[in-house]
Image (tube, rainbow, N blue to C red):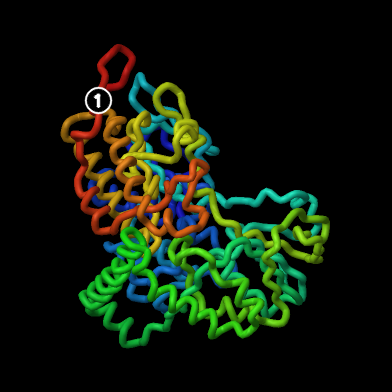
Amino acid sequence: MTQQRTLPATVDHLIVGAGFAGLGMAIRLAEAGEDDFLVIEKDGGVGGTWRANSYPGAACDVPSQLYSFSFAPNPDWSMSFSPQPEIEAYLRTVAEESGTLDRFCFDTELSDARWDEDDQRWHVTTTRGEVISKTLISGSGGLSAPKLPEIEGIETFQGEVFHSARWRHDVDLTGKRVAVIGTGASSIQIVPAIAPDVAHLDVYQRTAPYVMPRNDRRYTRLERLLFKTVPAVQRAYRAGIYLGRELYVPGFVWNPKLMAPAKKIALAHMAKAIDDPELRAKVTPTYEIGCKRILISNTYYPALAADNVDLVTDPIIKVTGDAVVTADGTERPIDVLVVATGFQTTEQPIAEHLYGRGGRSLAEVWAERGMASYKGTTTHGFPNLFQLVGANTGLGHSSMVFIIESQIAYVLDALRTMKTHEYAAIEPRQQAQDEWNANLQSRMKRTVWSAGGCSSWYLDAHGKNTTLWPRSTISFRKLLARFDAEHYDLEPARTTEGARA
């Protein structure tokens, strides 16, 4: 891929991240005639989460037809749920065909970004140099920084240890004693993929997840031909899947009792795969379905039931040089430790590097009351900062690509407004932001994520769900359909001596 080794001194728009969000933003900026932009990406190519997460068995749990840009449909998906290599290849192809890669700079990480009051621009320091930009658009996402467990002695482990999002493909697991910590979305794909090859596998579970059947299938040659030659067929197929997914919304956000049929399916799926009463008791959730992320797999339960796999529910108290020790005193020897403990979603790491008005970092602001922005996209005190996949934009039922495209449209309308009226800086008013978040948290109280009786990674240190969107995606798109300038402070360019016009 093209790498822009020398950074420009100034750009109109600086985009951070080259996953779905950053790539989509770049393409839409170019289509809108906003050609003066730069995309920086800390890794070596496009793909974001789908480049970083290449562990065995990695695949999407959202239907393939929804997991692509609406403006770049992919008729060549092989499966109804796409495997990771296909998603990464799709993003790479879209990037190459977009004609924007000459404005991407890979292996370049944002170190520090500060809003300068005098020239009304962002001054950004990266690992490859400095850039000054009118706007700063973060597409770093919520699943980019692995979350490591705080376990005594883990640093003394003498075998191989790595996070699922930093998979060591050079480590051969064949015949090894392996431990996997965590039973979330990554783990339930990893466990069945590696279990047949390892000598023994210990899976450490803190909370049992609900696992639904993975109704996956391979697309027929005829289907793929129709998708390619008659695009309307694929659009209709996509629309049908999208509307079907929206039917989950009432159970998630209005009345959790509506999730009863899904719970019945999940429990039946478990009972069919696991005969051992003791193991079945361990994997039976004790909270309402949907409170934590619902997972899909046809192979996870059979893998747990295999002779060389043990599910461990006793808490880990420490790791020694060659074993994991649990609270009951049992010491289980291992050669490789895989940490599948998720990501830093409620404390997005990029916030530590963004400094707004008064020199305060976004992390400092969020530490007071939790991650909160206006429409999940802009934040009071941080002019001309746009975040894609920001606070309360996550989903429990559908594709984040829909949310990302909705935000991109909102950002583009904001930029059009700035250009038309010659505003140098825009910033949401505190009142608008407070009212937006008060409404979100009020709605959140009746959702299954608050009333379902579980503790999840959706909740921050204040106990608030700052991760998910508590309404339908249709309502999200409607609320971001236009840039609502009336809720913003709008600043013209300053003309004081020494400042830029």
Which part of the image, by quadrant, shows the C terminus?
A: top left
Q: Is residue 323 left or right of residue 59?
A: right
How far across and down, in percent of the image, does residue 480 sit? 24, 48
- Against 214, residue 34 (above or below) is above
Q: Residue furthest left?
A: 420
Q: In the image as oriented, which residue stretches furthest toward the top?
A: 497
Question: Which amino acid type is shown beneath numbered disc 1?
Answer: Glu
> Where's residue 62, x and y in %?
40, 68
Structural crowding at the residue carrying mark 1, measured as other residues with C-alpha within 10 Å and reported as few (<14), some (14–19) or many (≥20): some
Residue drawn at 37 percent across, 31 percent down? 382
**Residue 74 against residue 371 in the figure, above or below:** below
Report how many numbered discs are placed on residues in the image.
1
For label 1, the residue is: 491
Nearer the observer, 292 or 8? 292
* Residue 464 in view in this figure: yes
Residue 447 on image: x %, y %:
37, 56
Q: Position of residue 97 (x, y in %)?
A: 34, 61
Q: Residue at x 30, y 12 (%)?
A: 497
Classify residue 277 as left or right of residue 448.
right
> Eyeballing the image, is 365 above or below 247?
above
Q: Residue at x 27, y 43 (%)?
A: 34
Q: Is residue 95 above or below residue 202?
A: above
Based on the displayed image, in which of its 4 quarters is residue 164 positioned? bottom right
Residue at (67% x, 58% y) in the render: 162
Of 420 and 456, the residue lying toward us: 456
